[in-house]
């Protein structure tokens, strides 16, 4: 089973493409695809939530998403129900 990573999720119906979240994301994880923002590089996301507050229409929220990648980058859970961090003994 994949571990879960704390990642931004954008509602494409709410996003107006203003770009404020892109400016806030130091590792450049976000891109504008057509008219809405998408998380183009989840591997590089530090799970720091810096993209959330700048959004003027609250189109972004954070969620635990099944994901593969480097557990040293961002926040991870091996088990979303029990809150066991990825890499914990027995996880
Ligand atoms: S949580 Fe941080 S690193 Fe991830 S997309 Fe948002 S600003 Fe970028
Ligand atoms: S800040 Fe919000 S409205 Fe603006 S591009 Fe990002 S998700 Fe879309």
Image (cartoon, rainbow, N blue to C red):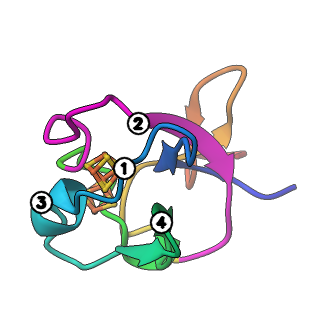
Tell me which label, 3 or 1, sits earlier in the chain: 1
**Are dots 2 and 1 in contact, CB under 8 Å?**
yes
Image location (x, y in percent) of residue 80 = 68, 30
Element marked by disc 4: loop
State yes or no: Cβ of the residue under disc 1 lies below 8 Å from any atom of ligand 2: yes
Which mark identifies residue 16? Answer: 1
Looking at the image, tell me whether mark 2 or mark 4 is earlier in sequence order.
4
Q: Which residue is mark 3?
A: 24
Instruction: Work out whether mark 2 precedes mark 3 in sequence or the reverse, and give the earlier one.
Output: 3
Q: CA distance from mark 3 to mark 1?
A: 16 Å
Q: Is mark 3 within 8 Å of ligand 1?
A: yes
Position of residue 53 relative to residue 90, above or below, is: above
| Residue that badge 4 annotates | 35
- Element assignment for label 3: helix
Disc 2 within 8 angstroms of ligand 2 (CB): yes
Left or right: residue 58 compared with residue 54? right
**Residue under pointer 2:** 59
Q: Mark 2 to mark 4: distance in Å?
A: 13 Å
Q: Percent position (x, y) of residue 78?
A: 67, 45
Percent x, y for residue 54? 14, 41
The residue lying at 16 percent from left, 56 percent from top is 20
The structure residue drawn at horizontal position 22% and vertical position 78%, both measured from the top left corner, is: 27
Asked if marks 2 and 3 touch (Cβ < 8 Å), the reply is no
Q: Main secondary structure of the magenta part?
A: loop
Residue nearest the viewer, comparing 35 with 1:
35
Mark 2 or 4, closer to the camera:
4
Against 4, residue 80 (above or below) is above
Q: Quick one: label 4 or label 1, which is nearer the N terminus?
A: 1
Asked if marks 4 and 1 touch (Cβ < 8 Å), the reply is yes
């Amino acid at each position: 089973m994949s571990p879960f990573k704390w990642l931004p999720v954008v509602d494409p119906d709410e996003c107006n493409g203003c770009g404020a979240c892109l400016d806030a994301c130091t590792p450049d994880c976000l891109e504008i695809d057509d008219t809405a923002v998408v998380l183009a590089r989840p591997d590089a996301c530090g799970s720091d939530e810096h993209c959330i507050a700048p959004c003027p229409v609250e189109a972004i929220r954070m969620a635990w998403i099944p994901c593969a990648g480097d557990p040293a980058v961002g926040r991870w859970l091996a088990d979303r129900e029990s809150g066991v961090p990825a890499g914990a003994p027995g996880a």
